[in-house]
Image (cartoon, rainbow, N blue to C red):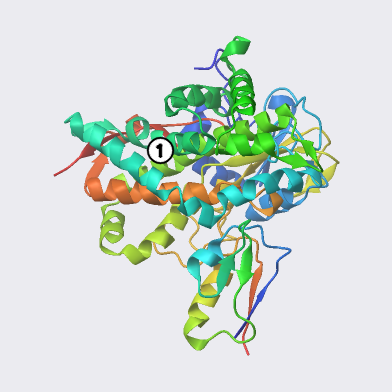
Amino acid sequence: MKIKYDRDACQGHNRCYMLAPELFDTDDEGYAILLVDGDVPAELEEKAQLAADNCPEFAIEIIES
Amino acid sequence: MPDVPRPPVEDWATDFDHTHPDYAASAPEIWDDLRERCPVAHTERFGGAWLPTRHEDVARIAKDTEHFTSQGIIVTDWRPEAPRPVGYAPPITSDPPFHAIARKFLLEFFSPKAIDGWEKTARETCRELIAEIRAKGLDEFDAATEYAQHIPVRVIADMLGLPREDGDKFRVFIHRIIEEPGQNAVESWEDTLDYYLDTKVKERRENLGDDLISYLCTADIDGIALQDEHVRGTIALLIIAGIDTTWSGIGSSIWHMAQHPVDRKRWITDPEVRPFALEEFLRFYAPVTMARLVAEDVEIGGCPMKEGDWTLLPFPSANRDPEAFDHADEFIIDRQRNRHTAFGLGIHRCVGSNLARMEMRVALEEWMDAFPDFELVEPEAVTWSTGQVRGPRRMPVRING
């Protein structure tokens, strides 16, 4: 599983950071920072899906490999 | 109370009035009805206004800063005087490109990590209020006026470096501005939010502290200090938007819990459900309906919106749209997929959303710890606010056990 984050669509709702802090941090202004590059570790796949499913701006996309 | 009673609404699809007491009493039913048969309602009141009810339409308007301007965000009988793109209360009343400049001043103060630093203040406030309630020794009291309403007031007063005792004043200003806009007796200049804030900004410019007002007093745009009107407007925004809204969110959550013992038990016994429960409270009881003015003619949901018309953005209605949410009309305490719009969508996403969330979480944690078993004294006695912020304003509860 890969995860794609669209910085232009992000409005800093911080839902991903709250649900999956292992995958997302936030910058000083509250916009998301994606912490994984490439494949999502297997044990975090559920959290990645959760982050994507709760983003009000549809800024996170999951790509199943 | 309004000076003049609002005329009765003939048909909510063609003559809606969100400031009418009937709307306060049954807004969710009105949205559901309109969403099925309309779905964009209109009224000649307020000089012409629209009420979209579907998630799709609300989202489209919220993200379209070309056809819609934020110069006006509270629907009134008149049109706003403060010119675009700044508006009366930047950044909420601002349009691009100025909006991003004005918003940047606030973002760092309201990021999740910055807000963590205020949790202690919020928790102490909740505990003080509960101690005050207990000291009275009553098993019946008003949870809206004796608990929920004080929490956001005290925290925002501390953030701004304003006296907590001024909280009652803030509530009067807010009530006039967003719950009964244009329906209030004319007040003296000395009795307005603008006068109050002008005085405070002047004081702060002469005696800087480490609060948010002081920061704004020293901020600049390209080397030019922010104008007094900008500082005043931004502080007005934080007071207006930061108090009624969170009070409503806390109050609605308590109202729900009072009537749902199964959800109370789940909250108490399963701490892992709490983050999901909070977002479901925000979805199901989203307090805030925003508004825009139409800047250029545009068609939404088949309706011709004309320049100068108002349009409301009822985020709570979008949150109950079955096209956007499974079982939209059900409160599901552990809902896993919840892209709710309680804090808006697009560039105007509520800048205080992390503060509001933290306050709601702490207020509920402390309440449920103190009063795990409670109920409404009389469900019909609960009253809800009118206008663009929805929450219980009178809510007598009985504590059991």
Residue B14 in view in this figure: no
Residue B383 visible in the displayed image: yes
Residue at the extreme front? B207
Residue, far right? B296
Q: Where is residue B51 in the image (x, y as percent from the top left)?
A: 66, 40
Where residue B227 appears, as percent x and y from the top left, is: 75, 30
Chain holding disc 1: B
Residue B337 in the image: state x and y as whole percent.
51, 67
Residue at (64%, 82%) from the top-left corner?
A: A37
Q: Which amino acid does label 1 sit on?
A: Ile
Residue that extends furthest to the bottom in the rendered view of this protein: A65
Along the line of sight, the residue nearer the viewer: B127 or B247 = B127
Task: Name the image quarter holding the C terminus of chain B.
Answer: top left
Q: Which of A4 and B106 is in front in this view?
A: B106
Please give the name of the residue rendered at 72% of the width and 27% of the height, measured from the top-left corner. Answer: B229
**Mark 1 crowdedness (10 Å alpha carbons): few <14, some 14-19, many ≥20:** many
Q: Mark 1 points at which residue?
A: B151
Q: What element carries label 1?
A: helix
Picture residue at 80% right of the left edge, 41% below the top:
B223
